[in-house]
Image: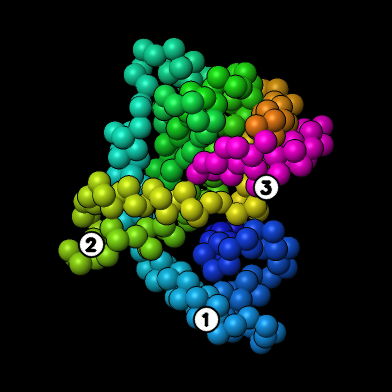
């Protein structure tokens, strides 16, 4: 599974729009060779191959960043987000609602999680590798409690399957901040706010792949079943997202038009009645 995530990220780096084909790749090898530009199928121009090769080299360098360094970066990035977004105070009505819904999930499936609200009209939610999940008040306005839990289950899935770690690895490797850390001697170094801001832009641009989204949808549905929540709420959440008509774009593709939220709603409707 770890290998799959690694390949998915390589794919995301090397080929824009590959999300539609990467899920169908039977073996990771074809993705890797495509990323390396070593495919002999021809057709792609020299500069494209060079870009792919450069991206692939970045990925191999990425493998040399330790998990501890990445966790430190994720914590710093989240602290920066909490400082620069409008973090709702604990006594805010949104915070109280989210705390009520998530109190039993702070230790979930072997993970230590924390949940906070950003006060913003954005319909969005995101998760980082340190186990922080943030929900925007715009999303909370739109979803009932069960639908909100379904979105939260989906976000927990991104943490559980290490998608957040993979995204952070990719973004960090391409960031100026990492070069600064490397120049100053490595792990443990503090990143400047400007570097953390740039890292955030890279995270926004390197969205999760379609297969990662599907994996998190399934995790979210299993989460709903496990806790005896309303299993139809995942479908409901996607219907509402679909009604936005793709006007929203965030760090997480659950809340954007691609992959198509209507199709994902159908899939969740069908899987909700699955007894597995
Ligand atoms: Zn997602």
- What is the span of residues highlighted in magenta in the rendered image? 245-274
Residue 255: image quadrant is top right
Mark 1 neighbour density, 10 Å: few (under 14) some (14–19) many (20 or more): few
60 relative to 174, above or below: below
Front position among marks 1 and 3:
1
Residue positioned 67% across, 85% down in the render: 42
Q: Foreground: 184 or 252?
A: 252
Q: Report whether the residue tagged 3 is closer than 8 Å to ligand 1.
A: no
Q: Nearer the viewer, residue 145 or 68?
A: 145
Q: Nearer the viewer, residue 32 or 239?
A: 239
Cα separation between marks 1 and 3: 29 Å
The reply, left or right, for residue 3 in relation to residue 76 is right
Q: Which residue is mark 2?
A: 180
x and y percent of residue 64 in the render?
37, 68
Q: Secondary structure at mark 1?
A: helix
Instruction: Identify the image quadrant of the C terminus.
Output: top right
Quadrant (top left/top right/bottom left/bottom right) for the N terminus:
bottom right
- Residue 192 point in image, percent of width and height: 22, 50
At x 37%, y 21%, the residue is 88
- Work out whether 187 lies above or below 229: below
Mark 3 or mark 2: name the one nearer the start of the chain: 2
- In the rendered view, tell whether residue 115 sits above or below residue 177: above
Residue 266 is one of the magenta-drawn residues: yes
Q: Which residue is mark 3?
A: 259
- Quarter of the image for residue 120 reads top left
Distance Cα–Cα, label 3 vs label 2:
35 Å
Q: Which residue is mark 1?
A: 47
Residue 254 seen from this side: no
Using the image, tell me which numbered label, if any, was put on residue 232: none
């Amino acid at each position: 599974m770890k290998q799959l995530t690694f390949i998915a990220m390589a794919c995301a780096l090397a080929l824009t729009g590959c999300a539609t084909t990467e899920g169908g790749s039977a073996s990771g090898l074809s993705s890797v060779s495509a990323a390396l530009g070593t495919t002999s199928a021809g057709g792609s121009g020299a500069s494209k191959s060079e870009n792919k090769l450069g991206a692939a080299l970045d990925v191999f360098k990425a493998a040399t960043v330790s998990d501890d360094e990445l966790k430190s970066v994720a914590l710093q990035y989240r602290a920066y987000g909490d400082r620069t977004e409008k973090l709702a105070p604990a006594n805010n009505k949104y915070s109280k609602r989210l705390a009520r819904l998530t109190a039993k999930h702070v230790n979930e499936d072997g993970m230590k999680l924390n949940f906070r609200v950003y006060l913003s009209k954005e319909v969005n939610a995101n998760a980082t590798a340190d186990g922080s999940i943030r929900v925007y008040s715009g999303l909370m306005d739109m979803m009932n409690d069960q639908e909100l839990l379904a979105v939260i289950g989906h976000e927990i899935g991104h943490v559980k399957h290490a998608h957040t770690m993979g995204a952070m690895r990719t973004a960090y490797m391409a960031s100026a901040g990492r070069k600064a850390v490397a120049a100053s001697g490595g792990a443990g170094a503090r990143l400047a706010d400007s570097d953390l801001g740039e890292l955030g832009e890279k995270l926004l641009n390197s969205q999760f792949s379609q297969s990662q989204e599907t994996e998190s949808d399934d995790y979210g549905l299993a989460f709903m079943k496990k806790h005896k929540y309303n299993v139809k709420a995942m479908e409901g959440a996607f219907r509402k997202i679909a009604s936005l008509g793709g006007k929203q774009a965030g760090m997480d593709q659950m809340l954007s038009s691609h992959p198509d939220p209507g199709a994902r709603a159908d899939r969740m409707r069908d899987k909700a009645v699955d007894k597995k």
